[in-house]
Image (tube, rainbow, N blue to C red):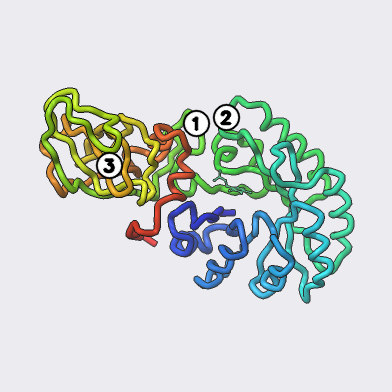
């Protein structure tokens, strides 16, 4: 099940879905709006609403567009029963195995399943749960969650689904019947200690720009808002046409890697809305127009994210609408 929520992690839902359609068993999305966008693009593959319906008014759309829904709380089943769909709605029951975000208790799951398996409004496709700590390959909580999931859902003989990207890479026992990759589909590493290349992943998104100016500054010259960075010597500083208004993280610290003309150079000073500055001492031939890669092949999105106190997921999702998209190979 290819997870394409949040505009396919910022990559463009419709283009990603067109590229994957027919090569995956289903798509996973967070809400009805995303599912409808898939149907508008004539994507006919099964689509699962990973959080189910938020409101009973969404139920007619499930039937009209042949969508599957997760049921993570009893009230979702109540509204489905009351709605009485013309054809059975395919559903997945979600067990809370310890993440304590969404999911049914084992008792709720047992009684809902008993009721549903004899009810014409639904067809139970399978069971799922979500792992909290799978990105740490030493964390025993994953083993505990897997055992709990098997104990409570294994007995029904229906498909089981537990693994996100981190579990796919680090916890083979969790693969079960359906895996649900998100981040790794986009070529970013889901594991803390491993980069994309080590996992055989290739980044899909490259955030690129170019140098808009190259300044020769003097020792002691401050750069950017607040003058938080000061030139330690006479040196060239490049100004890149990309800032937090484009989705580059404002909290990226001095020294964060930026690739200028294929050479890694450090970010200096505060990131502004429309631009950021880089130290060009290692890149003396750079001129206005020299291509710049903010993340993609080099540096990896996770490297930038770490330097900004966040995760690659957030950066990929946050590229703003004003950044022109070019889609290759779709
Ligand atoms: C987002 C999501 C995934 C995918 O997670 P990744 O860490 O991006 O692989 C899988 N399952 C559910 C229920 C999700 O919400």
237 shown above or below 154: above
Residue plotted at (16% across, 49% down) = 289
Left or right: residue 277 compared with residue 104: left
Find residue 192 and name its label. 1
Bin the neighbour count of mark 1 within 10 Å (Cα to Cα): few under 14, some 14-19, many 20 and up. Answer: few
Give coordinates of residue 42: x percent, y percent: 52, 72
Tell me which numbered mark, 1 or 2, is placed earlier along the sequence: 2
Can see residue 197?
no
Tell me which numbered mark, 3 or 1, is placed earlier along the sequence: 1
Task: From the image, tell me which residue sits under label 3.
Answer: 276
Task: From the image, tell me which residue sits under label 2.
Answer: 136
Residue plotted at (18% across, 34% down) = 280
Give coordinates of residue 120: x percent, y percent: 84, 69
Can see residue 123?
yes
Residue plotted at (85% across, 60% down) = 116
Left or right: residue 282 compared with residue 18: left
The answer for how far apart the CA atoms under marks 3 and 2 are is 33 Å
């Amino acid at each position: 099940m290819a997870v394409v929520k949040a505009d396919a992690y910022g990559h463009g839902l419709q283009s990603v879905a067109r590229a994957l359609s027919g090569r995956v068993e289903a798509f996973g999305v967070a809400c009805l709006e995303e599912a409808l966008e898939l149907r508008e693009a004539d994507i006919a593959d099964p689509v699962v609403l990973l959080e189910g319906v938020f409101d009973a008014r969404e139920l007619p759309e499930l039937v009209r567009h042949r969508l599957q829904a997760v049921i993570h709380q009893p009230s979702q089943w109540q509204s489905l029963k009351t709605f009485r769909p013309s054809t059975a709605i395919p559903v997945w029951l979600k067990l809370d195995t310890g993440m304590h975000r969404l999911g049914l208790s084992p008792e709720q799951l047992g009684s809902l399943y008993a009721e549903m398996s004899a009810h014409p409004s639904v067809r139970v496709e399978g069971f799922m749960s979500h792992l909290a700590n799978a990105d740490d390959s030493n964390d025993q909580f994953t083993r505990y969650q897997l055992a709990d999931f098997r104990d409570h859902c294994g007995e029904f003989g229906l498909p089981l689904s537990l693994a996100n990207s981190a579990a796919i890479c680090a916890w083979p026992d969790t693969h079960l019947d359906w895996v649900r990759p998100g981040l790794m589909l986009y070529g970013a590493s889901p594991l803390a200690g491993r980069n994309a290349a080590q996992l055989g992943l290739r980044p899909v998104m490259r955030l690129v720009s170019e140098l808009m100016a190259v300044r020769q500054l003097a020792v002691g010259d401050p750069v950017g808002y607040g003058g938080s960075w000061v030139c330690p010597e006479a040196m060239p500083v490049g100004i890149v046409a990309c800032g937090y208004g484009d989705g580059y993280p404002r909290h990226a610290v001095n020294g964060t890697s930026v690739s200028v003309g294929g050479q890694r150079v450090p970010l200096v000073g505060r990131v502004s809305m429309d631009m950021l500055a880089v130290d060009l001492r290692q890149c003396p031939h750079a001129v206005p127009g020299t291509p710049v890669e903010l993340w993609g092949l080099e540096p990896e999105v996770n490297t930038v994210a770490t330097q900004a106190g966040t995760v690659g997921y957030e950066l990929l999702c946050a590229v703003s609408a004003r950044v022109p998209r070019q889609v290759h190979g779709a």
